[in-house]
Image (cartoon, rainbow, N blue to C red):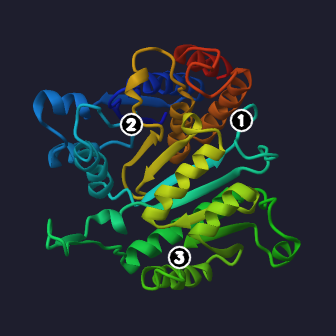
Amino acid sequence: MNTYKIAVIPGDGIGREVIDEGLKVLAASSQKHQFKIETTEFPFGGERYLKTGEILSDEEVNTLKNFDAIYLGGIGHPDVKPGILEKGILLKLRFDLDLYINLRPVKLYENVETPIKNKTTKHIDYIVVRENTGGLYTGVGEFQNKGEANEVAIQSMVYSREQVERCLRYAFECTQKRHKDQPWAGLSEEEKSKGYIGKLTLCGKTNVLTYVFDLWDRIFHEVAKDYPNIAPDYVHVDACCIYMIESPERYDVIVTGNMFGDIITDLAAVTQGGMGVAPSGNINPKGVSMFEPVHGTAPAFAGKNVINPIAAIITAQMMLTHLGETQAANDIEVGIKETIKKMKSMLVGEMGYSTNEIGDMVLEYI
């Protein structure tokens, strides 16, 4: 019987509530599919910072490396100055654990409303692979003449060949695994005739960011040669946003850099029904990975049993897929789909059920 050690970080605000629902689903699933989940909870977040002044030490990060995965509820506190927790915990985890892939499934479920007219579940079902440790977010930059009339602020987008290539290879592998049993339905007849089973779209800005995205584009086509069954595609980031609204069905898997990925995944989340159904994974393919819903901590709703836990439960499902428990993950997804069909809305206060009741409904199907 496989045993998985999971580090649980409930975090702040609604984190505890949604993580508890995910954990009870994981417990039921592990019992049904005969594997073990061993959890250890850590208090990292705003509450601890306010009480002790502690953020996240190197020793604590090293402790997390001993786990099979990290399950995070959310970090952020209204009484803590912006940037302290984000840089001291979230970015530190991302960089110190080398979580160089941010994986964002974009999937519209039945009975979930999308703001895009005439689009259904068959139109919105793709994955965004975001490079997660390079680019503008590395903090490379400076002020010149700060506070003076001729002040200049510089923020540098820095990427190495190694960073770009490992992200692109992950994206090609992701596309290939996504269609190992059946080719992507969105392929054109011409693409099918060439033997393609899926499509990977590079989202960049080669016409303006002529250094960084020249590097991305060159490596993209170099790596594509190793995946002759994946159709290589390119789109500028501004056009990418247009197509995500006009024709999201054109996307299978999108790969992009850190900044563009941060922006387009939030747009994508809205098209799939909002943050209440948007999961994410921060992946190190050779180390511990971290999984978190993307909705944040929503402190105004904390402790009221009214928040939507679906994103946290989908995130738990993602974690099981990553750990190799695909049958259990598929089982949870069935429960998620059936539960969503009964819900009146994905919005807080309009769901028709409490946080606990939604978790219980998923349990019933498992």
Visible residue check, residue 158: yes
Query: Of the residues under marks 1 and 2, which one precedes in the sequence?
Result: 2
Q: Is residue 44 left or right of residue 163?
A: left
Above or below 153: residue 214: below
Say whether residue 184 is left or right of residue 263.
right
Q: Is residue 30 above or below residue 190?
A: above
Residue sitting nearer the eye, 252 or 178: 252
Q: What residue type is disc 2 on?
A: Leu
The crowd level at tag 3 (other Cα within 10 Å; few <14, some 14-19, many 20+) is: many
Mark 3: amino acid: Lys
The local crowd at label 1, few if under 14, some if 14 to 19, many if 20 or more residues have their Cα within 10 Å, is: some
Specify the label residue 205 is tagged with.
3
**N-terminal-most mark, 2 or 3:** 2
Alpha carbon distance from label 3 to label 1: 31 Å
Image x and y of residue 144, in percent: 17, 74
Residue occupying the point 86% across, 77% down: 190
Q: Amino acid at mark 1?
A: Glu
Residue at mark 1 = 113
Give the quadrant of residue 291. top left
Residue 252 visible in the displayed image: no
Q: Residues under labels 1 and 2: Cα distance?
A: 26 Å
- Helix, strand or loop at label 3? It is loop
The residue lying at 32 percent from left, 36 percent from top is 76
Q: Distance from label 2 to label 3 (Cα)?
A: 32 Å
Name the front one of labels 1 and 2.
Answer: 1
First in residue order: circle 3 vs circle 1: 1
Question: What residue is shown with label 2?
Answer: 72
Element type where label 1 sits in the image: loop
